[in-house]
Image (cartoon, rainbow, N blue to C red):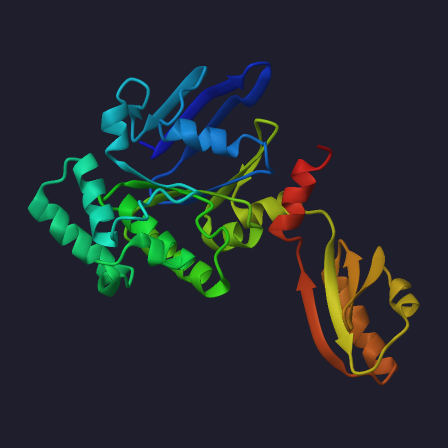
Amino acid sequence: MNAIEVNNLTKRFGDFTAVDNLDFEVENGEIFGFLGPNGAGKTTTARMLTGIIKPDSGLIKIKGIDIQRNPIKAKQIIGVVPELSNAYTDLSAWHNLQFMAQLYGIPKNKSTKRAEKLLMKFDLYEWKDHKVKTFSKGMKQKLILAMSLMNDPEILFLDEPTSGLDVRSSRLIKDMVLELNKEGKTIFLTTHYMEEANQLCNRIAVINHGNIAAIDAPEKLKMRIGGLKWVEIGFNIPVDPHDLHAMQGVVDVQKSGDKLRLYTDKPGRIVYQLVDYSRSSNLEILTLNTMTPTLEDIFIKLTEGE
């Protein structure tokens, strides 16, 4: 049984089809990335998966439970971290957690232990009696993540969890996501940060115009759709790009800072030629890297022509 199963999922707003007959599944224990440009349908899909809005047609199963027929049972095994904070800023961190416990009907003795454990886990315990309006954005995000875990969900939905955070807070949230995944939780992650998806996700789906444009592991997507690779090289002194453009298999040469990028579909052959060139020209190679297209390149390629 998969963590999430989606069949023929469709949602329209008037004449506009936001989500058009989606089919995909999320396996147990994976971090599944859901990517798409603004207006592509990713937020609408996530809201249907979490039972916030109803689809016009199609089927959603959460651990085998039809969320439309048994919404309460399905929602009991999921946690949601929305893009916009859902913490009550005039309440303390502690009271926000206890409020979540009451919503899920968690007994007082259990909710107290759970809240203490989560506050310790997210380094918020010393702030437990402070009002949330005094928290930094990073602290608020950690609290919202803690709130989503009060019912100890099997599946966690994260909507742009690092949006607007500084580098340190963003890294902390990503480390926590990986830790939660190691503990066995399935993560459904919507994001527009390509590097974040590349670092965290076992598989990603790219949605565009309400349809799935591609779905696979990040590295497999790069191999399947990527196109040209490039070799990046830096010498101890500047060289004439035309010399490198003449090498067999080089499609294009572009400057990249103090280095040169040689675009090719045969990077191994180019490396040998570069080594020979450096020897014959009495040059020292300072840096040499073979590069594949990034996930951002793939994303742009899949969603171009909007």
Which of these two is toward me, 11 or 20? 11
In which image quadrant can residue 241 be found?
bottom right
**37 or 102: nearer the viewer:** 102
At horizontal 21% and vertical 42% (from top left) the residue drawn is 99
Please state the horizontal and vertical placement of residue 225, each as a whole percent of the image.
66, 42
Say left or right for 299 vs 240. Answer: left
Q: Report the residue at 43% width, 61% height from top.
A: 169
Taking the image as shown, residue 107 lies to the left or right of residue 51, namely left
Check the image and name the residue furthest to the left.
109
User: Is 153 placed above or below 47 here?
Assistant: below
Q: In this view, does 146 lie above or below 151?
A: below
Choose top left, top right, bottom left or bottom right for residue 151.
top left
Please count the marks in the image.
0
Q: In this rendering, does residue 182 appear at all?
A: no
Using the image, determine if residue 14 lies above or below residue 258.
above
What is the quadrant of the N terminus in the image? top left
Question: 117 or 195, which is in the foreground?
Answer: 117
- Image quarter for residue 82? top left
Can you give x and y, in whole percent of width and height, for residue 187 in the image?
A: 38, 44
The answer to whether 261 appears left or right of 200 in the picture is: right
Q: Going by the image, does 241 lie left or right of 38?
A: right
- The spot of residue 275 in percent (x, y) is 78, 75
Residue 229 seen in render: yes
Q: Which residue is drawn at 14% across and 39% down?
A: 106
**x and y percent of residue 289 in the render?**
68, 68
Q: In which quarter of the image is the C terminus?
A: top right
- Residue at figure coordinates x 74%, y 51% from the top left: 228
Up the image or down, 255 lies above or below 239; here it is: above
